[in-house]
Amino acid sequence: MKIQPTLSPTAAPVPFGGIVSGLAALLCPRSRTERLKQELREALQVEHVFLVSSGKAALALILLGLQQLSPKRKVVIPAYTCFSVPSAVVKAELEVVLCDVNPMTLDFDRAQLERVLDDRTLCVLPTHLFGLPVEMEHVRALCRARGITVIEDAAQAMGGVSEQGWLGTTGDVGFYSLGRGKNISSGGGGIIVTNSAVVAQAIQTEYDTLPIESRWSAVKNLLELLATRVLIHPRWYWLPAGLPFLGLGETRFYPNFPIERMAEARAATLSGWRERLEASNRSRREQASSYLEELHRSGSEARAVTAREASYLRLPVLLRDRSAKQAFCGRAIALGLGVSPGYPSTIQHIPELQGRLAPGEYPGATEVVDRLVTLPTHRFVRPLDRTRICRVLEEASLDSGREVVEDGTSAHRSVVKAASGG
Ligand SMILES: *Cc1c(COP(=O)(O)O)cnc(C)c1O
């Protein structure tokens, strides 16, 4: 553990006011979930909203609902995405089918998507990774013709928009995550939105059978929110970041999660969510555009993955190759710069999924695993941090691109070695 100012890769702390509202809801129960649902319906212009315990619970519940409407079993997901996604598919006892992604957009590889759809495909999950809106029209047209449901994974894109409207509301059904690293957080939680009465009815039937999150987990959540508020600050983040048992920033395949209705206290911590969401997405866009200017100015070979109207939960950047990525991550993480190497593998290589997946090649997803890093865009990132991150990007790309010569660059060499050894 290194005691130094340390940025977290993402941050969406709940304001004290939200924590106080959560506490009040514990002490005097009133229906906060109904109010939140009403606000979400109005703000996002959707007919039906369901509040549950996590984003993966939201997805699993949608999948359980869809199974009432169709006997088809295949769920098509990106070969590079959050490990919670295949976890939810397995939880719902459906088949994971992968589709490659295009590294330049992080959207589905279109040609492969057409090939993987067949008469056993239940649904497809276009995913707005890092807040980058992916093309929905194309997926919708493909799916409409084949009677396939489009589930919009907007876990990382709440509050973002495209030409068709709010991200999350432009498929047949969509979901958001309120987890710690997402656009706004309540420590955990998930939201399902849909305008389809048929889909809503099917989800409602499953929802009615769910337990509510326990009082104890609501209390624990409030304590965690308080701790997070303090420890997420760069002055303190070295502490939780250095405690491996917290597993911060880890992504796990974990199909044994609970599917529960959201507790009232959790819903209460989202008071003022609209303003929080707007402020947080606005500042992330500003941070991203400052990075882009800086990268452009420095003539960097690192290539940011951008999209119009993206809300940049993190700024994805492709480095030249695997060794450039290792050099950069090794050094940036040692300096506490809030950089993340992204997901550790493609979905194809999750050990627990071996034997469950049809054979396939995912060169785009593999390239993303090899080359992609994300830069932090949250409000604790200062201009000086951005400058340091961009400088380390330059140095790492120089170091990994040439043999280190015997002169004053021994410090560089040791970092490269440490990075490629880990
Ligand atoms: C976080 C995330 C999820 C799942 O949300 P949780 O609240 O963490 O369960 C699903 N899809 C994507 C793309 C995510 O980033």
Image: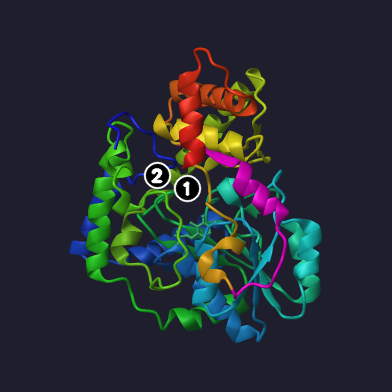
- Residue range highlighted in magenta: 355-380
Residue drawn at the location 64% of the way across and 31% of the way down: 302
Residue, far left: 27
Q: Is residue 59 above or below residue 132?
A: below
Q: Secondary structure at mark 2?
A: loop
Quadrant of the drawing holding the N terminus: top left
- Give whichever of 409, 309 is nearer the camera: 409
176 displayed left or right of 169: left
Residue 378 magenta-drawn?
yes
- Give whichever of 12, 272 is nearer the camera: 12
Residue marked by disc 1: 183
- Give whichever of 352, 125 is nearer the camera: 352
Residue 153 magenta-drawn?
no
Q: Position of residue 197 (x, y in %)?
A: 60, 76
- Give whichever of 233, 68 is nearer the camera: 233
Q: Position of residue 344 (x, y in %)?
A: 52, 52
Q: Answer whether residue 401 is visible to the viewer in this image.
A: yes
Amino acid type for the residue under numbered disc 2: Ala
Residue marked by disc 2: 12
Q: Tell me, yes or no, whether the two marked residues, 2 and 1, touch with CB atoms within 8 Å.
A: yes
Q: Quadrant of residue 318?
A: top right
Q: Secondary structure at mark 1?
A: loop
